[in-house]
Amino acid sequence: MEEKTKIGIIICDRYRTCAGGKCLRSMRNREGAFSIYADSDVELVGYTTCNGCPGGNIEYAGDEMVKNGAQVIHLATGLLVGYPPCPYIDTFKDFLEKKYGVKVVLGTHPIPQKYLDMHTQLGTWMDPAWSPRLSATLEDEAVRNAYN
Ligand code: SF4
């Protein structure tokens, strides 16, 4: 490992009591969206929630994370798998990228299998627009089961 990438993670406020277990585990294992760092070191420089709909803390968290050196901000997998998924996720990504010149990745840990099963039943992700949003975190079934 040569280069170090500084990252921030913003989670959905529905999961505000989350201690970050799945995100930190997948960051360590380079699974899910963290597979892009397979050949580099990673330093977490910020972790917070959006502070509840409609995400008022996105602006301030982004500013603080970038000031702390964040090059990439991950919008956590909870924004993708919640019931319903965050309706603002594309807006958050566009805003953070344009305002702070930072790269934004949708997702953190692999999608747990139980969420894929439920969203398949619900038809949540039928729209083709979901394919690129989910691509970093789908993984294979064995990995998804390991994150159930
Ligand atoms: S659904 Fe979106 S805006 Fe609402 S709490 Fe979750 S991340 Fe924040």
Image: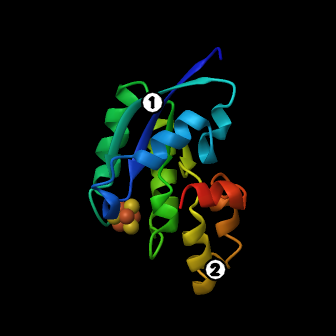
Q: Is residue 69 above or below residue 113?
A: above
**Residue that numbered label 2 is attached to:** 120
Residue occupying image coordinates x 33% and y 47%: 19
Find disc 1 in the rendering and name its residue.
Answer: 70
Secondary structure of the residue carrying tag 1 is loop
Residue beneath the point at 47% across and 45% down: 23
Judge by depth and name the residue closer to the eye, 128 or 26. Answer: 26
Q: Secondary structure at mark 2?
A: helix
Q: Nearer the viewer, residue 23 or 65?
A: 23
Q: Is mark 2 within 8 Å of ligand 1?
A: no
* Residue 48 x/y as whole percent: 32, 45
Q: Residue at x 33, y 53 (%)?
A: 18
The answer to whether residue 78 shows anywhere in this view is yes
- The quarter of the rendering in which ligand 1 is drawn is bottom left
Give the residue drawn at x 47%, y 51%: 75
Can you name the residue that lies furthest to the bottom here?
A: 122
Judging depth in this view, the residue of 32 and 124 nearest the camera is: 32
Q: Amino acid at mark 2?
A: Thr
Q: Residue 46 got which mark?
A: none
